[in-house]
Image (spheres, rainbow, N blue to C red):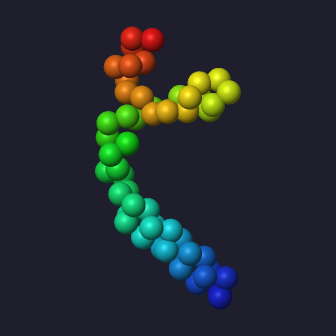
Amino acid sequence: MDELKWFLYAFFGLWILWLITGGPSRFENRNRQLLEQPAPIEGGRPYKIQELKTK
């Protein structure tokens, strides 16, 4: 039972951190929804759907 309690504490703690850092309404999530592939292939930067249409 102690393992479950610690798991729930850790899960709740991570949820609080996620909420403090912006949660689902982060600036990146609202304005640039997609990510490029990592550095060797592309730059790994976020981009908009409109930018995808122009590629």
Q: Tell which of 22 and 11 is nearer to you.
A: 22
Q: Position of residue 46 (x, y in %)?
A: 45, 33
Q: Residue at x 42, y 70 (%)?
A: 16
Q: Residue furthest bottom?
A: 2
Q: Position of residue 25 (x, y in %)?
A: 31, 50
Q: Residue furthest top?
A: 54
Q: Residue at x 39, y 61 (%)?
A: 21
Q: Residue at x 35, y 57 (%)?
A: 22
Quarter of the figure with residue 32: top left
Q: Is residue 33 above or below residue 5?
A: above
Q: Position of residue 9 (x, y in %)?
A: 53, 79
Task: Report the side of 48 relative to 43 (left or right).
Answer: left
Task: Report the side of 8 relative to 20 (left or right).
Answer: right
Q: Is residue 54 above or below residue 4?
A: above
Q: Is residue 29 above or below residue 7?
A: above
Q: Residue at x 63, y 31 (%)?
A: 39
How many dots with numbers? 0
Q: Is residue 4 above or below residue 34?
A: below
Q: Quadrant of the N terminus?
A: bottom right
Q: Tell which of 33 and 39 is nearer to you.
A: 39
Q: Quadrant of the C terminus?
A: top left
Q: Position of residue 54 (x, y in %)?
A: 39, 11
Q: Tell which of 53 and 4 is nearer to you.
A: 53
